[in-house]
Amino acid sequence: MLEGSARPLSEVFDLAMLDLDGVVYVGGQAVPRAPESLAAARVGGLRLAFITNNASRAPQTVADHLSALGVPASASDVVTSAQAAAHVLREQLGAGAKVVLLGAEGLRQALLDVSLVPVTVEEEAAAVVSGFGPDVTWGSIMHAAVRIRDGLWWVASNTDATFPTSYGTAPGHGVLVDTLRRFSGVEPVVAGKPARPLLDETIRRVGGEHPVMVGDRLDTDIAGAHHAGVPSLLVLTGVTGLRELVAAGADERPTYLSLDLRGLQEAHGRPELREDGVAVLGGWEAYVESGRLRVDGTGGPADWWRTVATAAWAHLDATGEPVDVADLDAPPANESPSTQAGAR
């Protein structure tokens, strides 16, 4: 269940590991209030690390994008799944090892940065590493699949099923991973979220004794935090909506929940779950009636979401079934007013 904090999270933690798309920006635009929220957190002494499962872009490219959106960043503030994969390979193989590259320039640069030698799929190698690469040929994929099946060690940067593009959501690297897995019968070592190497790599590079993961996706960001044993903050500026939130299993539930990145600068109330199954916080009461979630009262929108999550998760744990939210009116996650009318 959600936890509370009497102090702003920026005073509780010393490192915020921030997912990018849906948290800091959406496509080419900064998420509303993200730049000023992160600037305020930095002034308060919170270190920021920007982490991404996208293995195709180099850290400097990501940093330049962030800076252009009003979030100053350097390459040392960015950690990618390509870097995490390269570290996994270097730890196992040592400097100078040859690795078949099945990906884009960001992954190539990550290998070179740790003194590994990227080679083509036809050359002798100690391992193969795969990542998102729209220009990777089918011939290379076929050859790599055979070599993996025949025993070549395989590290995958991530298993993301989708990838955002200017023309819509497209197949991500996870689709390729699934193809290679089904053909070869081999499970890769995965570096990106929800596996823990990316978060471990971030802490190793940026530092921080008390980190918090900040994300918008339950199945990667929040699950990744669970795997790494660190607290998490879910923000509602990305892909997680009401239906996804109420259906979250134990390993996809955040420690804290906020409308957006202003949650780093705020204290967090902890909903009380009464013996009668009613969750209470900040003027709201959430409960399940005939399998449907109901909410009474008035209060702040963030507390509405926290109260609803608590009641819904208690119901899910007790029955094994997500609660019905079909007729529940959620206050918009991006609204600023301090109070909202009660939901029916």
Image (cartoon, rainbow, N blue to C red):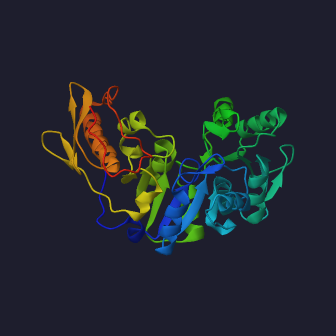
Give how far across and how far down residue 138 sits, in percent. Answer: 81, 32
Name the side, left or right, on which 89 lies relative to 96: left
Q: Residue at x 48, y 42 (%)?
A: 219
In terms of depth relative to the viewer, which is nearer, 329 or 231? 329
Report if residue 230 is visible in the image: no
In terms of depth relative to the viewer, which is nearer, 167 or 275? 167
Instruction: Classify 231 as above or below 22.
Output: below
Instruction: Classify 198 as above or below 219.
Output: below
In terms of depth relative to the viewer, which is nearer, 121 or 278? 278
Instruction: Classify 218 as above or below 199.
Output: above
In terms of depth relative to the viewer, which is nearer, 106 or 296? 296
Give how far across and how far down residue 284 sits, in percent. Answer: 23, 45
Instruction: Name which quarter of the figure residue 75 lies in.
Output: bottom right
Give how far across and how far down residue 12 sits, in percent. Answer: 38, 69
Q: Residue at x 49, y 68 (%)?
A: 40
Instruction: Classify 319 as above or below 120.
Output: above
